[in-house]
Image (cartoon, coloured by chain):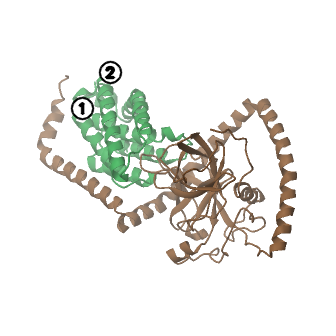
Amino acid sequence: MSAALPILSVLFAVLIAALPWGLPADATFVLPLVVVMMVFCWRVIPGAILPPAVAMLLGVLLDVTSGGPLGFWALLALVAGSVGHFSRGLSSRWDWSPLGLVWTGLATALACSGWLLASLYYLRWVDWWPIAFGAVVSAVLFPVIWRGLLKLYGDAYPRDDFTRRGVA
Amino acid sequence: MPRLNPVFRKKSSSWRLPVELLTFALYFLCGVLLILSRIGHGTVADARDELAELTSPLFEAASAPVIEARHAIQRVRTYAGGLAELDRLKHENERLSEWEWRAKLLERKVEQLRKLLGAVDEPALHFTTGNVIADARGPFVRSALVNLGREQGLRAGYAVINGDGLVGRTIDAGASVTRVLLLNDLNSRIPVLVGPAGVRGIVSGDNSGDLSLEFIPDGASLYLGDEVYTSGSDGVLPRGLRVGSVSGRAGSFKVRPHADLSALDTVSVLFFNTPTLASAGPAPASNTCELPTVEAPSIAPAAGKVSAAEPIPSSAVKKIGDVTGPAAPVTRVRQ
């Protein structure tokens, strides 16, 4: 069960992201980007198991529930997972700032590429504001999500084991 | 830069090539999926429908408490501003009483004129009501999943309304779940009439809160606050459904939808079988497929006529009358 924690938590986030929360049109990008951020975080945490293929499948599920083209969120989740994997050296249990910077940069890149991809898909310039707003909110939410996932992971594993797995 | 944990460095080096190959294959697969979605490949669409159908019970169960919570927040807000709301409602009631009298007068006049002209009575508009169980989030679409499907007689192309006005139209109908393309989606184009003069135009979505008003004839006079309603000239949507009111500024007019598209819960689907829809495919087998063709909902509210699939409460029936027909004139500000 503990090994499946990353997958289950992202799956839960996908479900939450699709529910009719009544968010304004400007905030429609926030929840899916939180899902992508969770993929990034789980790939950063050493020892947490979230293979790229599963990250992609979860992205496809997000595509299905959001009604968008299949592959869009899957692609963003894959990119976030890859960047997260290569950022493992920066992981620290209490100091989230280096990873926060990485995520801010990544969220900016994902927002730009997502906007370009959406514009290319529709052959017209789509409204950039909701995407930019989502990226900014996700950067603000990063410490909360990071700490939350670490807490979840710490509860699932004994502290010794947690430390041995590389999170100081 | 902190030193990497040696255990992980060792592990990753032995798996580097297969993992990188796999990751590259996954990126490629994502690209293929995107292209297939763009060209509208049938397999992708079918797979999506199947998956949406499979997950719909889960979303239905999970969305119930969310909708309840939204209602609770709304109630708290209403109580918080109770006195101001009471004053507003009193004024509105006075205004509406005045309009009721005028409406009855006009109704009588219309009835007399129809008799003089020997006009044929138009059939009533049938509908069924369901709940939104999931929202679409992302740069591509503004859509919603509704817990109604082919079992209730739905199919692609039907108009979807709520108590405030037009919400969108159905685009995919599964057995028990249907996807609704909202008015503000990039793919949404609705032919409309604007204002008392009935200026023709197209309302299109751009994924933002307001809608764009395009293809207005040169020299047409538009005013802020003019009512916008469907023209029915596309042969898909019935004529006279309230869409919104004109906002923005001269030269780049927008339409503010009456319906709050970001906070939908209960919606009604109108069974409007035009020749366009009838030729699109056979009617789904259900106990509502024999509904008569409907015309001019502005004159024929669905009072007393409900879908055979689901009994509609009288409050829902009333909503049809509310959202159809050219709306009452509003105070206008000349640009």
Same-chain status of marks 2 and 1: yes
Check the image and report above or below for B54 versus B257.
below
Residue closest to the far front: B219
Where residue B3 appears, x then y in whole percent? 17, 24
Name the secondary structure under disc 1: loop
Would you say residue B259 is visible in this rendering?
no
Q: Is residue A35 left or right of residue A44?
A: right
Q: Is residue B213 left or right of residue B13?
A: right
Q: Amino acid at mark 2?
A: Asp
Would you say residue B121 is visible in this rendering?
yes
How would you rate the neighbour count of disc 2 (Cα within 10 Å): few for under 14, some for 14-19, many for 20 or more?
few
Residue located 19% across and 29% down the image: B5
Front residue of B139/A120: it is: A120
Residue B232's quadrant in the figure? bottom right
Residue located 27% across and 36% down the image: A84
Check the image and report above or below for B77 versus B29.
above
Where residue B131 appears, x then y in whole percent? 61, 55
Front residue of B88/B233: it is: B233
Mark 1 highlights which residue? A87
Say which chain tag 1 marks: A
Please state, as top left, top right, bottom left or bottom right, where the N terminus of chain B lies in the image. Answer: top left
Contact, mark 2 vs mark 1 (Cβ under 8 Å)? no
Colour used to depict chain A in the structure image: green
Q: Amino acid at mark 1?
A: Ser
Mark 2 highlights which residue? A95
* Pointer 2 or 1: first along the chain: 1
Residue located 42% across and 55% down the image: A64
Please state, as top left, top right, bottom left or bottom right, where the C terminus of chain B lies in the image. Answer: top right
Residue B74's quadrant in the figure? top right
Colour used to depict chain B in the structure image: brown
Q: Is residue B71 left or right of residue B216?
A: right
Name the secondary structure under disc 2: loop
